[in-house]
Image (cartoon, rainbow, N blue to C red):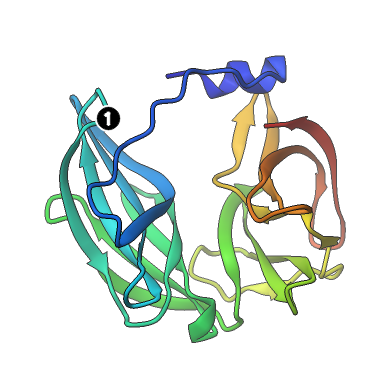
Amino acid sequence: RCDIAEIIRSGNFEPEIKWMKIPNIKKFFADPFICSINGKVINVLYEEFLISENYGIISSLQVDDSFQIIDNKILLDIKKHLSYPFIFNEDGKTYVLPGASRTGKLSCYEYEHQTRSVRFVKDLIHAPLLDSTILKYNEKYWVFSIQNMNDINYELLIFHSDNLFGPYQAHLKNPVKVGLNGLRPAGDFIKVDGSVYRPAQNCERSYGESITVFRIKTLNESDFEEEFHMKV
């Protein structure tokens, strides 16, 4: 229980962390995104990895305000690996863009809160992208994603469009960064005091070792620059 704005301002991350217990050792949970909070019920979309099937699905998890599981429901299973169900709200609607690099495309689904279900809307970008995260900035939509370079390095790619549903164009400087620290998105962008911060995974020594947070200095169709802000 903490205030993300104060964490960004102070540069310190020292909250008390409460871990949820998973009742089934045949699966693990990853990439949680809070979809909604209704009273004392928190609805979280996440990757549910099925060890026996060796791929991930997208599920909807309801927990109470003490983080005890109330209900769990499968949201999307395409029989290929899905992960990172990024959530984007626009014009009163909620959209989900799960990671699906094995399909070779980034797909957009509309989420229905009452039924906790999704409806396919459109394929936005045809490329094997991982952990795609959208930022609305200066009246444009910016998709930050990575591609895996033979498990050695990541390439950070940016795409932009005047419309959420595209068409998207590749940034002129793609790949804007190459490496293992500070490329792979680690959740939504954070806006504090007029600045935009980008959390990214540090995978130099191990996958998901820590999170590096950057402050975006420049973002337009021809240039991109960010600076280190803090490590979590």
Tell me: residue 65, above or below residue 118.
Answer: above
Tell me: residue 216, above or below residue 18.
Answer: below
Specify whether residue 163 is in view: yes
Residue at 68 percent across and 47 percent down: it is 200
Q: Residue 226: where, in percent of width, then height?
A: 83, 43
Q: Is residue 57 left or right of residue 146?
A: left
The residue pinned by badge 1 equals 67
Quarter of the image containing the N terminus? top left
Quarter of the image containing the C terminus? top right
Residue at 48 percent across and 85 percent down: it is 103
- The answer to which image quadrant residue 223 occupies is bottom right
Q: Residue 70: where, in percent of width, then height?
A: 14, 39
- The residue type indicated by label 1 comes to Phe
Q: Is residue 198 left or right of residue 163?
A: right
Q: Is residue 158 left or right of residue 26?
A: right
Tell me: residue 59, above or below residue 152.
Answer: above
Specify whether residue 182 is in view: no
Q: Residue 171: where, in percent of width, then height?
A: 78, 68
Residue at 54 percent across and 64 percent down: it is 163
